[in-house]
Amino acid sequence: MLLACTVAPLLAFNLTPSATLFNQLAALAGWGLVLICIGMEGAPRWRLTPAAASLALLALAPWASHLWGGLPASLALANSGMLLAALALLLAGQGLARDQRHQWVEALCWGLLLAGVLSLLVSLVQVFMPGWADGNLIARSGIAGRAVGNMRQPNHLASLLMWACVAAVYLADRGRFKALGGALVLPLLLFGLVFAVVLSASRTGVIGVLILACWGALDRKLGRASKLALMAAPLLLALSWVLLAAWATLGAHALGAESRLAEGAGSPSRLAIIANAWALLKANPWTGLGWGEFNLAWTMTPFPDRPIAFFDHTHNIVMQLAVELGLPLSLLILGLLTYSLWRAFALSRAANGVGADVGNDVGDAVARRCAFMLVLMIGLHSLLEYPLWYAYLLLPTAFAFGLALGSDKDEGASSGTQGWALAGALMLAASAFTAWNYLQVVDIYAPSANAQPLLQRIAKGQASTLFSTQANYAAATSLPPGPAALAAAQSTAHNLIDARLLVAWAKSLQASGDVDKARYVVQRLREFRNPAGDDWLAECEQMPEAGAVKPFQCEPPLRDYSWRELRD
């Protein structure tokens, strides 16, 4: 659990081009070890629940997009593999016997609490002593006055801190803090974690703090001390704000929370991206765009009022599934997940307040409530962001969901352990293989002293099993414009498109003789108003010499093209 829940989100070391890959691989390896340990205790019973069925359908979606939509096999394999790992953890969690469930809930909570406390320390350094952040042990914050944690995203940090708050409540109710100071430990922990939420300036985190207060007010099965501590969470939030505002004023420091929260509850760019996604959904209601194709479809569809940032996600899980999978399949999956969430809540309400064994000082109800709250917190976050696309948040969520959905009848474990051990071993092997495979692409972007020439490194990266799209980005933007660079651009466009790629893509289309499509791509580049394309487009503002032909990027296309025409 320490590797799965604590080490994974605390890793700061990274290698270009991915800032969080090693965090995700640590999570995959850690949860693989958890599965092996669960199997050694006695294998959980397999039960195909609606939640498991929804994950199974999601795991098939990337391959459907590969077969019928052209999603690269490397992306289909990576996405499907992570969803299968989540499915294994969900099945394991929901199949545990009651005593095992209590043990694993406690282990999960210790891991999350330690991750939250360490992330608090990281946040303090990033805001108050940014010079101490070396980028390897503590990540540097790229946003003045805001903490980003070692996951380098304020919202991910806030979600982890909210999980740590839930974990602290569970452990306090079990009496695990008696030796550390008793009743004062939980309020102090909550204050520290809420303080870090304010340091992150995450509006999602602020909503999470209010949800904690509602939990404390409504849950009658929590201990009185825990209820009071949770209900005081908004006061702790206000106190943290006052202290930080005073510090910023006295020392003329930047307070990221002030400018961030001044934007209000909604972000204009997020609302605009949802509006754009709705337009794409109306155009593709039955089958959707295909898993992983939103960024390509959105970028290559005319949206004059589009947000100027490059988005690869709608920032809303409901809209994301709807626009990529289509209404019939997405409604089925979302219906299964919603029913499962309601079922987890119903099981937590129906659970007794008395532990299953004599030495257990907390009831099954609190264990289920805490597991349910972990899922609820990240579910609400998923309506504003896309945390479940990251292994260090997806895999704990899947396991907690399984724990919350465990049978209310203590059926005990089954006899065989081979299946769970194999699943855990595959996750360990996948983590190691992915790290090795990734180094082939790292060599393109950060070559060693005796590295091969760039073209050879790109060719080696293009042959990698999992990261060919990253290598194709280098090919599309480094090779001379032409058919080879064009093919690379069309491949890497399934991953993420930016201004530099759009420029290279247009040049390769023009060099390959498809001038009108090249001009259409230029039109999309203009919509983003990105500085990376300004110099190239500035040629159109210069007065051409007499008889000179204007560059191709200066003329509009003769017609519009669908994003599928640009993909092929």
Image (cartoon, helix red, strand yellow):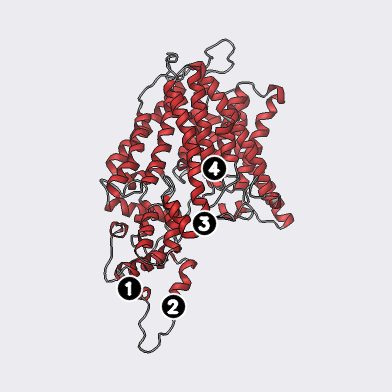
Neighbor class of circle 3 (other Cα within 10 Å; few <14, some 14-19, many 20+) is: few
Q: Quadrant of residue 84?
A: top left
Please report the residue visible at 45 percent of the width from the left and 76 percent of the height from the top: 538
State how far apart marks 1 and 2 are (Cα): 15 Å
In the depicted structure, whether residue 97 falls above or below residue 282: above
Q: Are marks 3 and 4 in contact (CB under 8 Å)?
A: no
**Residue highlighted by disc 2:** 539
Q: Which mark is residue 452?
A: 3
Q: Nearer the viewer, residue 494 or 122?
A: 494
The residue type indicated by label 1 comes to: Pro
- Which x, y percent locates residue 391? 48, 39
Q: Are marks 3 and 2 in contact (CB under 8 Å)?
A: no
Q: Residue at x 70, y 53 (%)?
A: 131
Inter-mark Cα distance, 4 to 1: 44 Å
Percent position (x, y) of residue 182? 70, 24
Q: Please identify the quarter of the rendering in which residue 144 is found.
A: bottom right
Q: Which residue is mark 4?
A: 22
State the image coordinates of residue 293 (x, y, percent, origin top left). Answer: 35, 50
Query: Eyeballing the image, is 8 above or below 492?
Result: above
